[in-house]
Image (tube, helix red, strand yellow):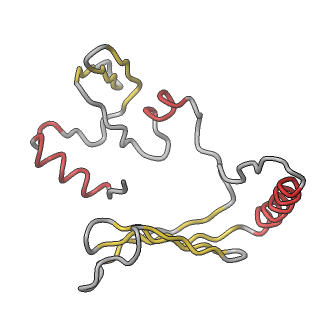
């Protein structure tokens, strides 16, 4: 499921009331227990709740604690992002697609009935050479009966 941050905030405000939303609150960690979760914030404040939504951005404290995957890794792309309103026709297809070129990629994701999120990306030259080398290695490894390894982080 894909939802824009603005739509998520509007939905939460409508369901929970504006006073339940605290933008800018710095989460330092959480602890799950039977029947709920405790969210810990900078300054020592704690909130006990049934559900914690980890919408704390790219450098997510929630994600790192939950998955243990560490900080994001730079994969060699520069990306832009935009949201557009569609005309009368709904988004074609199943809800998302991506087109790959040699250096650029472009993807669209459906955001509701008549909106799409578009993300053009471009590979930096140094990373492009590394990516091409890795693709060649992966393809030759796969043709030798090996398991294809993930190229994207």
Q: Nearer the viewer, residue 128 or 36?
A: 36
Above or below, 83 against 37 in this view is below
Above or below, 26 against 85 in this view is above
Left or right, 81 with reference to 27 = right
Measuring 67% from the left and 53% from the top, which residue is drawn there? 152
**Residue 20 appears at what percent x and percent y?**
15, 36
Q: Nearer the viewer, residue 123 or 15?
A: 15
Classify residue 32 by image quadrant.
Answer: top left
Which quadrant would the N terminus be assigned to in this image? bottom left
Classify residue 33 by image quadrant.
Answer: top left
**Residue 127 appears at what percent x and percent y?**
76, 62
Measuring 67% from the left and 77% from the top, which residue is drawn there? 101
Left or right, 49 with reference to 117 = left
Measuring 70% from the left and 74% from the top, which residue is drawn there? 103
Classify residue 45 by image quadrant.
Answer: top left
Above or below, 149 against 87 in this view is above
**Residue 122 appears at what percent x and percent y?**
64, 71
| Number of marks present in the image shown | 0
Q: In the orientation shown, which residue stands out farthest toward the front?
A: 145
Left or right, 70 with reference to 38 = right
Measuring 32% from the left and 56% from the top, which residue is drawn there? 3
**Residue 18 appears at what percent x and percent y?**
12, 44
Above or below, 66 against 126 in this view is above
């Amino acid at each position: 499921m894909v939802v824009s941050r603005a739509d998520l905030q509007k939905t939460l405000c409508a369901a929970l009331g504006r006073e339940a939303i605290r933008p800018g609150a710095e989460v330092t960690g959480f602890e799950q227990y039977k029947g709920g979760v405790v969210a810990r914030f900078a300054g020592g404040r704690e909130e006990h709740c049934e559900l914690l939504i980890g919408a704390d951005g790219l450098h997510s404290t929630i994600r790192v604690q939950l998955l243990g995957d560490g900080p994001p890794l730079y994969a060699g792309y520069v990306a832009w992002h935009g949201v557009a309103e569609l005309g009368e026709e709904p988004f074609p297809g199943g809800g998302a697609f991506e087109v790959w070129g040699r250096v650029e990629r472009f993807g669209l994701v459906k955001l509701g009935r008549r909106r799409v999120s578009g993300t053009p990306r471009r590979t930096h030259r140094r990373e492009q050479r590394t990516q091409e080398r890795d693709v060649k290695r992966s393809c030759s490894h796969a043709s030798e009966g090996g398991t294809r390894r993930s190229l994207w982080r």
